[in-house]
Image (spheres, rainbow, N blue to C red):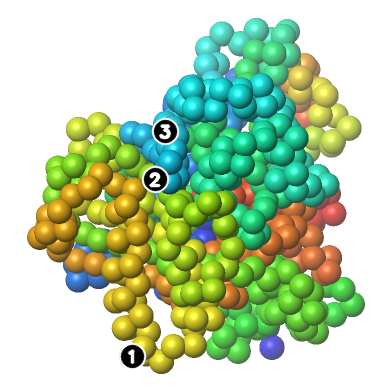
């Protein structure tokens, strides 16, 4: 898993949760909340979709790590276990 | 003997139960919805009679906003349920009215129209009106722990003209108040936003479109549904619900139970019984509704473009249980032909009229007397409503009439299970959905988010709050 692939997986999740948002020009270093209209219900869904699709657990204390696309990639990439 | 075990059992296959079910099934919970009737939808359902399709409950979906407007309840619910906006195929209203004896306020899905009407007809109330609107816009209406306040008391700090106050309360009460003569302020805000700041729409084919979308999402997500399969008892031990007993005696085990049956109704299912709690919070407000079907849209003979008309002719609007079978002083007219169907249209003309009704006076009738009462009050209700529609010779709508139907408090009781046929359930809402049992929660009408968008958000919120977000829920 590369960080770029990880970003793509996160964008896939956001596009399913918020199909009415334009995700074509997201800036990786800016907070997602500042570029998109995402509320706490949407962030909870990102966490739950990560668990559902990729088996990744994000403890509540780490929710802040999901603030921007870049911080998502930094935090989540090591959590992807290579498939055997 | 236990036949099945679920992570979550949901009581009731209405809007809120389905929405809760979709969330839970989507995130991998083993979930089953138990519904006593063979038709889904609960309070907002549909039926066919003599080859014709009818809606019950829904006049209009409230909380409608145009595509592109984000951060409102409609948008939240579409996202949470992974529904594309187009799937609901919503068509906006044309215009609506609040019609009192000597005053009429027009409103549309553009809030500016209502504001102009209020400022023009009640110029002395202008400052108070603006302050009220500000208070509505800034209030945190989705807080699950807000302290109850009287809406009459809060509104009276802004508005002083009793006519304007009554005219604002009339639609909000008719579309969602389970309390007589007043509303909890949080409920007032939810309704004010849903009706005035947002607006009305419906799918061309009515409420069945919305229910079908929900059923399909629930099925796709892997949810299970048992129809004609009511829950007759919730058995508890040491403060936890341990099993459900179905009408046919089957026992079901579930880690958690979400009930959309209503507060008092759910308390009465509990074993040991909670009848005292139920009796302290049971609704009394019920409705009768007439439905007239015509061979052409009523606009053709001059009934105009109004989608919904909220009417009242008494000196003060009195939202309370009537002493007679039906209170003819006020009501709601719905002309479903008057949505903007973008070139399409309903195959026939329809007039629906809703009025406050007294449950006991309908419930206690023999079958013959019930039929006679329906016939009598059908005429009375439609005549009452027609005072607020443009005058037309009786022979015109009579000649165009193809069919009629009517529902009464007795019908509401039968299809929703609500005690007293109480359309909006219990007067005191349980916003956090908690009950005396640690794993039994309420959703739907008695949790207190109103309208069908509110009902769906209620199911979503309770599923999120009590199951998906709860760390102890993870096995």
- The spot of residue A6 in percent (x, y) is 66, 21
| Residue B219 image position (x, y, % from top left) | 47, 56
Viewer-nearest of discs 3 and 1: 3
Please give the name of the residue rendered at 53% of the width and 51% of the height, measured from the top-left corner.
Answer: B315
Q: Residue at x 73, y 8 (%)?
A: A29
Q: Label 1 is found on which chain of the structure?
A: B
Question: Which residue is under mark 1?
Answer: B368
- Label number found at residue B106: 3
Residue B409 higher or lower than B82, as above or below: below
Which comes sooner in the sequence, label 1 or label 2? Answer: 2
Would you say B91 lies left or right of A13 here? left
Q: Quadrant of the N terminus of chain B?
A: bottom right
Establish if B421 lies above or below B209: below
Q: Mark 2 points at which residue?
A: B309
Q: How far apart are marks 1 and 2 (CA)?
A: 33 Å
The reply to whether residue B412 is in sight is no
Q: Nearer the viewer, residue B193 or B222?
A: B193
| Residue B261 position within the rendered picture, expressed as x and y whole percent measured from the top left | 61, 68
- Please indicate, yes or no, whether residue B436 appears anywhere in the rendered image: yes
B420 relative to B54, above or below: below
Badge 3 crowding class, 10 Å Cα cut-off, few under 14, some 14 to 19, many 20 or more, is: some
Image coordinates for residue B161, horizontal then vertical, percent: 62, 36
């Amino acid at each position: 898993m590369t960080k770029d692939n990880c970003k793509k997986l996160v964008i896939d999740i956001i596009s399913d949760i918020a199909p009415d948002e334009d995700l074509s020009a997201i800036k990786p270093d800016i907070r997602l909340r500042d570029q998109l209209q995402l509320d706490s219900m949407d962030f909870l869904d990102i966490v739950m979709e990560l668990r559902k699709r990729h088996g990744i657990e994000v403890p509540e204390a780490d929710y802040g790590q999901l603030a921007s696309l870049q911080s998502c990639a930094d935090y989540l990439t090591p959590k992807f276990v290579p498939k055997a | 003997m236990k036949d099945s075990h679920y992570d979550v059992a949901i009581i009731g296959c209405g809007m809120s139960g389905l929405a809760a079910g979709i969330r839970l099934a989507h995130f991998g919970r083993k979930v089953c919805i138990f519904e006593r009737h063979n038709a889904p939808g609960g309070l907002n359902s549909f039926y066919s009679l003599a080859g014709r399709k009818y809606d019950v409950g829904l006049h209009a979906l409230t909380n409608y906003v145009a595509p592109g407007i984000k951060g409102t309840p409609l948008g939240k619910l579409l996202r949470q349920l992974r529904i594309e906006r187009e799937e609901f195929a919503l068509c906006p209203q044309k215009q609506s009215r609040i019609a009192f004896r000597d005053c009429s306020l027009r409103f549309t899905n553009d809030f500016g129209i209502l504001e102009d009407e209020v400022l023009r007809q009640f110029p002395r109330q202008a400052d108070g009106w603006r302050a009220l609107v500000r208070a509505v816009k800034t209030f945190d209406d989705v807080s699950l722990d807000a302290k109850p306040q009287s809406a009459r008391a809060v509104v009276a700090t802004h508005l002083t003209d009793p006519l304007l106050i009554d005219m604002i309360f009339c639609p909000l009460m008719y579309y969602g108040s389970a309390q007589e003569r007043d509303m909890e302020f949080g409920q007032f805000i939810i309704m004010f936003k849903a009706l005035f700041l947002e607006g009305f729409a419906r799918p061309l084919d009515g409420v069945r479109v919305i229910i079908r979308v929900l059923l399909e999402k629930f099925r796709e997500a892997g949810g299970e549904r048992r129809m004609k399969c009511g829950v007759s008892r919730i058995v508890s031990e040491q403060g936890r619900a341990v099993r459900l007993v179905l009408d046919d005696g089957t026992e079901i085990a579930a880690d958690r139970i979400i009930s959309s049956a209503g507060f008092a109704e759910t308390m009465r299912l509990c074993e040991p019984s909670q009848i005292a709690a139920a009796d302290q919070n049971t609704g009394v407000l019920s409705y009768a509704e007439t439905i007239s079907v015509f061979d052409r849209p009523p606009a053709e003979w001059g009934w105009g473009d109004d989608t919904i008309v909220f009417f009242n002719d008494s000196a003060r609007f009195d939202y309370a249980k009537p002493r007679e079978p039906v209170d003819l002083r006020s009501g709601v007219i719905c002309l479903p032909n008057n949505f903007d169907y973008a070139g399409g249209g309903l195959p026939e003309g329809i007039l629906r009229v809703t009025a406050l009704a007294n449950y006991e006076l309908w419930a206690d009738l023999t079958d013959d007397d019930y039929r006679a009462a329906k016939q009598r009050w059908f005429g009375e209700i439609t005549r009452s409503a027609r005072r607020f529609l443009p005058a037309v010779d009786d022979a015109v709508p009579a000649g165009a009439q193809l069919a009629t139907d009517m529902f009464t408090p007795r019908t509401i009781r039968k299809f929703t299970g609500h005690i007293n046929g109480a359309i909006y359930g219990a007067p005191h809402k349980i916003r956090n959905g908690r009950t005396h049992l640690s794993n039994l929660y309420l959703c739907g009408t008695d949790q207190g988010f109103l309208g069908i968008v509110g009902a769906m958000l209620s199911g979503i919120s309770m599923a999120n709050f009590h199951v998906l977000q709860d760390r102890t829920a993870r096995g």
